[in-house]
Image (cartoon, grey):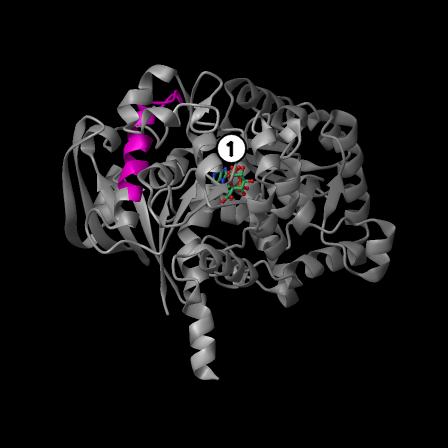
């Protein structure tokens, strides 16, 4: 029997995306469909989302949802079944989904995402707009509160909360608590209280039936203070409910053989065509020819991503004969360091501060390697795109990077299974050593080709992970007998 899942999330590709969360939320419905899960995605009615919505039906109107009028509008768009929370006072703004154009968080984010979470619980419980859902799947702090609403409503609908990044806690001061509409007793340590205020993510982790993280290694890491960001105790206490399910990639959107953003699409057997993409990158980033590797960076420019460390190694990269093409936005001081590096090394380092989906594809399709020196990385998607595109990942040995890349050590090379380079400890020396190792391997064309091909052979589709999510939903869904009954009938 088809299981009906409601995924509630603050971004979903191709409607709206600021990072990997959007990619994953956009890909989940198709990943689950083969396992008889019908997923509807509830998302805020940002202007581009409203503009893209087709075949709309108004499911419900709220006269006062966190102080504003709002509607739940069902529709289809860009291959997704969505329900949009149309609340212009909250979501029709210039700027991003989380903050203004300068990157400052919207001050009413607790209302914007509190409202989204409340609406998700209402929909899942069948209080508004239909019969409800069999399971609710919330993502990160922006929607984790939905699990708490289900819990304190005494609802039977099970909830799954996925941690894409535990560093963002969704903490707000205690005075917002009454406006959340939760019972008084919810404001305690065994509830939504967190460091004297309200923790949206904490509330979800405390109340969800299942917690997932986006890689098995990150699921282990967040039990430790270095990675748990204050939530390690809760994760440890709930360890029997914590599951690590690695992200897949949308192999239709990220397919080097049919990628419209590439100057020359190619496959494993026609890797020589990548040269044309490299030439397009050189032109776009103002780079001159070179015999060393062309490194790419496609990243938020933050300390999580180790971009401060990388910015400090640009002179060494050039000294080793490498070139660098970078696209990203983030901390202004890191942006400034990369801009300064580009000025010091014209023709060798090209920097574009900004966000550009098409350039991100071109870089994967033409650069030799992608640098990902993250201090922590719940999963990471750019290494998966790199693997699929023959753009060899050079990455920190942490989280999902550790789970998806096979380091080119001597044993892996001789067994022919290496797919990239992993290094311990995100610091200047470690990074330089790894880049130097990769640069030497690059000079050995046969070895490099084998690493590229091995990465391209690997399966990073959603097949396995889609099944894992479907199994998890069924384990907690209110009619867990669905599967067994079906099997029994078949017998
Ligand atoms: P995170 O979500 O932590 O930023 P991920 O590796 O999971 O990291 O996902 C990042 C996603 O955002 C990838 O799809 C990547 O290609 C994309 N991305 C990051 N920065 C940029 C940029 N400046 N321009 C285009 N795409 C970007
Ligand atoms: C977060 C994490 C990233 C992960 C993405 C999608 O943004 O930082 O590692 O790949 O979510 O799950």
**At 47% from the left edge and 46% from the top edge, which residue is drawn?**
209
Residue that carries the numbered disc 1 in the rendered image: 328
Quarter that holds the N terminus? bottom left
Indicate if the residue with disc 1 has its beta carbon within 8 Å of ligand 1.
Answer: yes
Q: How many numbered marks, from 0 up?
A: 1
Front-most of 451 and 490? 490
Residue 308: x and y in percent read 63, 23
Mark 1 is surrounded, within 10 Å at the Cα level, by few (under 14), some (14 to 19) or many (20 or more) other residues, namely some
Give the quarter of the image for residue 347: top right
Residue 39: x and y in percent read 36, 57
Task: Name the side, left or right, on which 265 lies relative to 394.
Answer: left
Front-most of 297 and 244? 244
- Is residue 481 something one can see in this rendering? yes
Residue found farthest to the bottom? 491
Q: Does the magenta run of residues contain 118?
A: yes
Q: Which residues are magenta?
A: 101-121
């Amino acid at each position: 029997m088809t299981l009906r899942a409601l995924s509630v999330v603050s971004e979903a590709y191709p409607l709206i995306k600021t990072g990997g969360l959007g990619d994953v939320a956009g890909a989940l419905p198709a990943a689950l469909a083969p396992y008889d899960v019908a997923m509807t995605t509830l998302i805020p009615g940002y202007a581009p989302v409203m503009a893209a919505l087709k075949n709309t039906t108004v499911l419900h109107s709220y006269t006062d949802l966190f102080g504003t009028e709002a509607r739940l509008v069902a529709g289809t768009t860009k291959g997704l079944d969505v329900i949009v929370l149309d609340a212009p006072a909250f979501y029709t703004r210039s700027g991003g989904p989380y903050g203004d154009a300068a990157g400052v968080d919207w001050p009413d984010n607790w209302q914007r995402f509190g409202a989204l979470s409340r609406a998700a619980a209402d929909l899942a419980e069948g209080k508004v707009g239909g019969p409800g859902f069999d399971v609710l799947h919330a993502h990160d702090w922006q929607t984790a509160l939905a699990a708490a609403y289900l819990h304190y409503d005494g609802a039977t609908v099970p909830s799954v909360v996925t941690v894409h990044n535990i560093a963002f806690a969704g903490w707000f001061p205690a005075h917002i608590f009454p406006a959340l509409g939760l019972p008084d007793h919810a404001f305690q340590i065994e509830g939504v209280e967190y460091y004297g205020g309200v923790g949206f993510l904490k509330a979800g982790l405390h109340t969800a039936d299942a917690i997932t993280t986006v890689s098995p290694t990150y699921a282990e890491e967040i039990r430790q203070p270095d990675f748990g960001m204050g939530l390690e105790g809760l994760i440890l206490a709930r360890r029997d409910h914590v599951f690590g399910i690695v992200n897949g990639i949308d192999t239709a959107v990220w397919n080097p053989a049919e990628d419209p953003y590439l100057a020359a699409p190619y496959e494993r057997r026609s890797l020589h065509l990548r040269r044309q993409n490299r030439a397009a990158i050189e032109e776009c980033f103002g780079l001159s020819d070179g015999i060393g590797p062309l490194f790419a960076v496609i990243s938020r420019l933050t300390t999580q991503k180790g971009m401060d460390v990388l910015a400090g190694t640009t002179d060494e990269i050039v000294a080793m004969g490498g070139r660098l093409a970078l696209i990203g936005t983030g901390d202004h001081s890191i942006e400034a360091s990369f801009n300064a590096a580009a000025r010091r090394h014209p023709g060798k380092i090209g920097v574009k501060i900004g966000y550009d989906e098409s350039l991100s594809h071109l870089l994967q399709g033409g650069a030799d390697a992608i640098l990902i020196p993250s201090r922590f990385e719940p999963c990471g998607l750019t290494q998966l795109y790199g693997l699929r595109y023959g753009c060899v990942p050079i990455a920190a040995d942490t989280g999902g990077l550790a789970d998806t890349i096979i380091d080119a050590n001597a044993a892996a090379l001789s067994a022919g299974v290496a797919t990239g380079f992993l290094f311990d400890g995100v610091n200047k020396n470690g990074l330089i050593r790894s880049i130097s190792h990769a640069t030497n391997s690059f000079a050995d064309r046969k070895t490099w080709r084998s690493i590229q091909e091995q990465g391209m052979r690997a399966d990073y589709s959603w097949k396995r992970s889609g099944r894992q999510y479907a199994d998890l939903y069924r384990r907690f869904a209110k009619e867990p007998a669905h599967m067994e009954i079906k099997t029994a009938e078949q017998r």
